[in-house]
Amino acid sequence: MATYLELTNGVLNRMNEVELTASSFASARGFQIQCKNAVNDAINYLNQREFGWPFSHNTQTETLVASQTRYTIPTGTQHVDYETFRISKDNSLGVAGTTLRVLDYKEYVDKFIEQETTSGVGGVPIYVFRTPDNNYGLYPYPDKAFTLKYEYYSRPTALSASTDTPTVPDQFRQVIVDGATAYAYQYRGEAQQYQFNFSRFEEGIKHMQSILL
């Protein structure tokens, strides 16, 4: 797996600049810092162009709290697939596995929000709704510690240390380098080279989409 150092040096090589080493990486100066930033910029753009990459996919398991309606999505979530919410089968709790239906928030407010100020009306959730703050809630609220599962896509974590590695598979490392090189030329104000390399970057993303999606 290509490290942050290796990706940055891939850009520096294309720009005919001096490479960094493991010992000099943290103390990079001038254009070397811009090349480091360009790597993260390329990874961020790649994830903005397509949120549903397999390498960004995660499954969340949540132990529900009796009488609690609203819950928080994991930090760093880019997109939640609300069609995947389900309650796991648990014989000890007397619940069969079931898939939750998606409920519009306005409909929840119009018809069911009174549950949040009423006790003793919980049960096995049958609906999930997205809240205005981009978290989620359940109706009815759980009356036991059921296990809830759902799937989501996470945002990339910025690379920082020289040994950090991106979640993008190593076979596509050159796509990151193409994008980072384009940004490096943009930082230098070299518009023609920027456009050429950014076109390569876009083609690389399309190639990734055709293989992975």
Image (spheres, helix red, strand yellow):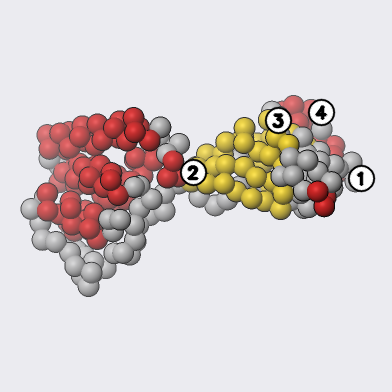
Labels in figure, total: 4
For disc 4, the marked residue is 111
Q: CA distance from mark 4 to mark 3?
A: 15 Å
- Which class describes the residues within 10 Å of circle 4: few (<14), some (14-19), or many (20+)? few
Which amino acid does the dot numbered 3 rest on? Arg
For disc 3, the marked residue is 101
Q: Residue at x 17, y 33 (%)?
A: 195
Q: CA distance from mark 1 to mark 4?
A: 17 Å
Q: Is residue 40 toward the left or the right of residue 213 in the image?
A: left
For disc 1, the marked residue is 120
Of callouts 3 and 1, which one flags the residue occurring earlier in the amino acid sequence? 3
Asked where in the image residue 26 lies, by quadrant, the reply is: bottom left
Marks 3 & 1, CB-CB < 8 Å contact? no
- Which class describes the residues within 10 Å of circle 3: few (<14), some (14-19), or many (20+)? some
Q: Which is more foreground, mark 2 or mark 1?
A: 2
Q: Is residue 41 toward the left or the right of residue 51 in the image?
A: left
Residue 42, position as x, y percentages in the image: 29, 44
Which amino acid does the dot numbered 2 rest on? His
Q: Residue at x 45, y 36 (%)?
A: 52
Which amino acid does the dot numbered 4 rest on? Lys
Query: Looking at the rendered structure, which numbered label has been put on residue 57?
Result: 2
- Which class describes the residues within 10 Å of circle 2: few (<14), some (14-19), or many (20+)? some
